[in-house]
Amino acid sequence: MISQATVFMLILLAIGVIGKNQTLVIAVAALLLMKWTGLGDKTFPFLQAKGIPIAVTILTISVLIPIVTGEIGFKQLGGAVKSYYAWIALASGIFVALIAKGGVELLQNDPHITAFLVIGTILAVGFFNGVAVGPLIGAGIAYAVMRAVEFFSSTGV
């Protein structure tokens, strides 16, 4: 008999195929393969606990590659400082990193909210060609909005 989890994953696989999203297809296929071969018992707890920090590290490495290869250096940095777009990018980077910090906490501590964040991300990845960083940023935005609602609820505003 096929489990509810497997049916859910097969639906996600279909969404990935229909949406032509290679990342989602590979992720679902890898997870199903781990589950069906018995590797999931060992890998799932590790990936659940360490997956986000590992993924953030890999993203950081990819962002730093132009610096280590010399494509971006002090000359480009000096030129960018003169552009207000660079300052907007700097502020955006700071803002997103601070928002994502709350998202990490929410993803780790609130599984029922996480399910909807993940579903939202899957829909965006599968149907709108989004990028799967959505759960972290989405969780950060959700965390910030939840805290704002709590604040205004407690003050009677």
Image: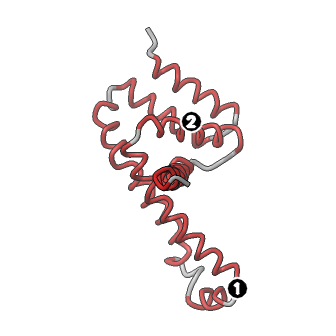
Q: Looking at the picture, does residue 41 appear above or below residue 88?
A: above
Q: Foreground: 70 or 93?
A: 93
- Image location (x, y in percent) of residue 103: 46, 53
Q: Label 2's element?
A: helix
Q: Earlier in the sequence, mark 1 or mark 2?
A: 1
How far across and down, in percent of the image, does residue 111 sit? 41, 37
Residue kind at label 1, given as amino acid type: Ser
Q: Give the vertical position of 92 relative to 102 (above or below).
A: below
Q: Which residue is mark 1?
A: 83
Is 56 placed above or below 116 here?
below
Residue 54 position, x and y percent, is 39, 55
Q: Is residue 36 above or below residue 81?
A: above
Image quadrant assignment for residue 49? top left
Which residue is the extreme one toward the left?
Answer: 42
Q: Residue furthest top?
A: 1
Looking at the figure, which quarter contains the C terminus? bottom right
Horizontal side, residue 10 vs residue 54: left or right: right
Q: Quadrant of the N terminus?
A: top left
Say left or right for 130 vs 107. Answer: right
Tag 1's secondary structure? loop
Q: Which residue is mark 2?
A: 119
* Amino acid on which disc 2 is placed: Ile
Q: CA distance from mark 1 to mark 2?
A: 38 Å
Nearest the viewer among 68 and 21 is: 21
